């Protein structure tokens, strides 16, 4: 096991054993040689077979597992060429994620069984697999530290979708979270548009006329005014509401900073060819703030669908 790895050999062995016991093959609908060729260039890896007809790993695996099945069913987890019991966490998680890929696993039900096994064992080492995208209507999963920003953003994303579950909003939420590392200006632009949508949706439901010229801080101020933030179980609800509104008033300052980020780094503004986006850590901070604001407004309003 490499120094610094969090995923222990015990966890990796438990996963391998349970996949074997439940008869859930890691390669899904693919032949094992073809699955592994998605991750490794098997033609450049050595063979365990001395015969010239099987002189690379691809031909070796094809002969012994796809044609004859004369190796142990869990052979891949102990094969030194792949070193899955000791390889670094990132490479190991990439292997596991590939077994969940829609091009590999044949049914969503199989993917859910695999996901249950992986998360049951990986959680002991601080990891979980969470949805990070989709392809042809099916989910793509990636491994993330349980307390990582990726993991927190996933759950915030799901909370928002519970209140605003429409194609447009889902697209913006997914775009915002998926772009947090890869394209920070897209993430910031999508986040601003999400907040605008949340505010307009609530104001329309509250029969408040929305001025098309309102800035985002103005939208938030009017949304705060339209919602009832009175704590139902507080001893002094009026005092509590006053304090809550004072806190929410600080959102205007936060959003002013968001607007400046949007102007400097977000999509929708012309950029030079050599433009460099904001560092990922700041985009993730922004997304976290946007998500929390959206959730508290939507939860307070009890909104279930957006109004166009």
Image: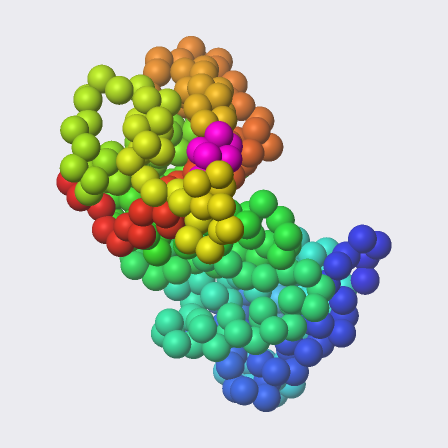
**Which sits in the foreground, 23 or 163?**
163
Q: Quadrant of the C terminus?
A: top left
Q: Does residue 171 appear anywhere in the picture?
A: no
**Which sits in the foreground, 232 or 148?**
232
For the magenta stretch, what is the residue range? Answer: 241-247
Q: In which quarter of the image is the N terminus?
A: bottom right
* 246 drawn magenta: yes
Residue 2: image x %, image y %? 81, 57
**What is the chief secondary structure element of the magenta stretch?**
helix
Residue 117: image x %, image y %? 57, 76
**Which sits in the foreground, 7 or 151?**
151
Residue 230: image x %, image y %? 40, 45
Res. 80 image quadrant: bottom right
What's the residue at 51%, 70% (across, down)? Answer: 115
Residue 215: image x %, image y %? 31, 19
* 167 drawn magenta: no
Up-down relation of residue 7 to residue 243 (above or below) = below
Q: Is residue 149 left or right of residue 196?
A: right
How many labels were placed on the picture? 0
Up-down relation of residue 259 to residue 100 (above or below) = above
What's the residue at 59%, 62% (across, down)? Answer: 128
What's the residue at 59%, 88% (across, down)? Answer: 21
Up-down relation of residue 261 to residue 240 (above or below) = above
């Amino acid at each position: 096991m490499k120094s610094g790895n969090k995923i222990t050999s015990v966890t990796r062995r438990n996963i391998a054993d349970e996949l074997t016991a439940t008869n859930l093959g890691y390669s899904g609908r693919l032949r094992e040689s073809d699955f592994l060729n998605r991750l490794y260039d098997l033609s450049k890896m050595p063979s365990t077979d001395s015969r010239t007809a099987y002189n690379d790993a691809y031909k070796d695996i094809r002969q012994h597992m796809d044609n004859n099945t004369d190796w142990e069913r869990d052979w891949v987890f102990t094969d030194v060429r792949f070193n899955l019991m000791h390889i670094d966490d990132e490479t190991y998680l990439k292997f596991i994620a590939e077994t969940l890929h829609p091009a590999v696993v044949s049914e969503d039900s199989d993917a859910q069984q695999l996901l249950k096994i992986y998360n049951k064992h990986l959680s002991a080492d601080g990891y979980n697999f969470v949805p990070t995208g989709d392809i042809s209507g099916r989910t793509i999963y990636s491994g993330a530290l349980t307390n990582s920003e990726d993991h927190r953003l996933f759950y915030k994303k799901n909370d928002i979708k519970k209140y605003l579950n429409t194609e447009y909003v889902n697209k913006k939420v997914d775009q915002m979270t998926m772009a947090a590392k890869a394209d920070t200006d897209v993430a910031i632009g999508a986040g601003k548009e999400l907040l605008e949508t949340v505010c307009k949706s609530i104001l329309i439901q509250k029969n408040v006329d929305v001025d098309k010229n309102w800035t985002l801080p103005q939208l938030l101020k009017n949304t705060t005014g339209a919602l009832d933030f009175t704590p139902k179980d507080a001893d002094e609800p009026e005092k509590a509401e006053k304090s809550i509104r004072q806190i929410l008033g600080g959102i205007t300052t936060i959003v002013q900073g968001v607007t400046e980020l949007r102007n400097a780094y977000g999509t929708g503004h012309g950029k030079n060819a050599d433009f460099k986006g904001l560092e990922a850590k700041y985009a993730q901070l922004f997304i976290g703030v946007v998500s929390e604001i959206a959730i508290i407004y939507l939860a307070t309003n009890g909104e279930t669908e957006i109004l166009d």
